Amino acid sequence: MAKVTVMGSTGIIGKNVTFKLAKEDVVSEVVLFSRPESIDNAKGQSYDMYDALAAEDIDCLLTPSCNFEDLAGSAIVLITAGVHRKEGMNRRDLAFVNAKIVANYAKQIALHAPDAIILVATNPVDVMTTIALDASGFDRNKVIGVGNHLDSLRLKTYFARRLNINSSEIHTRVIGEHGDNMVPLLSSTTIGGIPLKYFIREVEIDVLEIVKTLRNAGNTIISKKGATEYGPAYAISNLITTLITNTHKILTVSLYLDGEIADVKGVCLGVPSVLSKNGNAMIIPIHMNEYETNKFRKAAEEIRALTEDVRESLKEDD
């Protein structure tokens, strides 16, 4: 049983993650961390959630707080606080504003929960993962971004729906930036164990249209309902429970690279990794075709450049 803190618990994604975690058998307490001006909202969320949990005889402790000392003992601290993307906004538009929030929270986590794993969900997530790593001073395997986990789930679902095949038969992955420079690994995608390139000879499927839909998924949802909500929340909860239960699943998360894939170094990007509760995330080296390798390196260049700009802006503010 683990204690988890959600920083940004009154936001759309934060409150959904909190409620999902509260229903997990492996979570004993969730700290609903918020700014002092939002503490009443956090308390209200907890009261409402308790009412719902009572219907299912769930006894998870919910602790609304704006006190950093309440982070103590957390196995995982999720940072989802920050300005959220609106219709037409690029994730990168948020970088300079959100970096200040993430850096401050990461420093407080290091001070009050030094044994915790930091999970970053604030966008642009690859840049924010590096900022949290810098600010916390933690080992690079203890600071994880949600990366392309949701993108990978979306791609899996798109193939399953187009082909009318159970999603458990679809094995695919998206790596690189969680954004415009995401890289779907179509060369290693299999359906029922059959490589995609052979499967599509027998079935009519527009792969390029599926990839286009994937790249626009977030904006499409935001344009229809104002925000992404359930998808990110459930993907994040899935990552957290994977870490807590130590099931060693391979998920695509954002980690600081040191040449493990395509010789890319000094930047956080989404890569397939084995996650464990002790914070020893292990990056899985993979083979890519030339197109995928070039796209991955392009993503690295652009995220690295933005990360350095954000780092410089934080120095100027100090």
Image: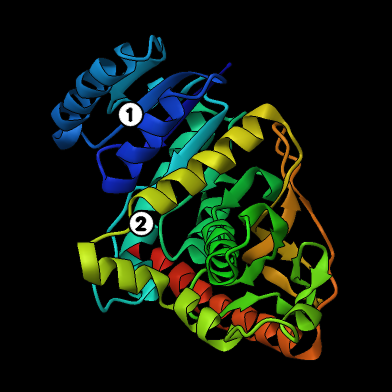
Judge whether 122 appears above or below 72 on screen.
below
* 192 relative to 73 in the view: left or right: right
Tell me if mark 2 has few (under 14), some (14-19) or many (20+) residues whose alpha carbon lies within 10 angstroms of its own. Answer: some
Visible in this render: residue 106?
A: no
Tell me if mark 1 has few (under 14), some (14-19) or many (20+) residues whose alpha carbon lies within 10 angstroms of its own. Answer: many
- The kind of residue tagged 2 is Lys
Residue at 40% in and 64% down: 314
Judge whether 11 appears above or below 200 on screen.
above
Q: Quadrant of the C terminus?
A: bottom left
| Among numbered discs 2 and 1, the one appearing first in the sequence | 1
Q: Please state which of residues 264 and 266 is positioned toward the viewer in this rendering.
A: 264
> Looking at the picture, how far across and down is residue 221, in whole percent?
31, 66
Q: Please state which of residues 232 and 193 is positioned toward the viewer in this rendering.
A: 193
> Looking at the picture, how far across and down is residue 63, in whole percent?
33, 19
* 16 relative to 310 in the view: left or right: left
Secondary structure of residue under mark 2: helix
Q: Which mark is residue 116?
A: none
Residue under label 1, please give it. Answer: 32
- The kind of residue tagged 1 is Leu
Residue under label 2, please give it. Answer: 100
Quarter occupied by residue 242: top right
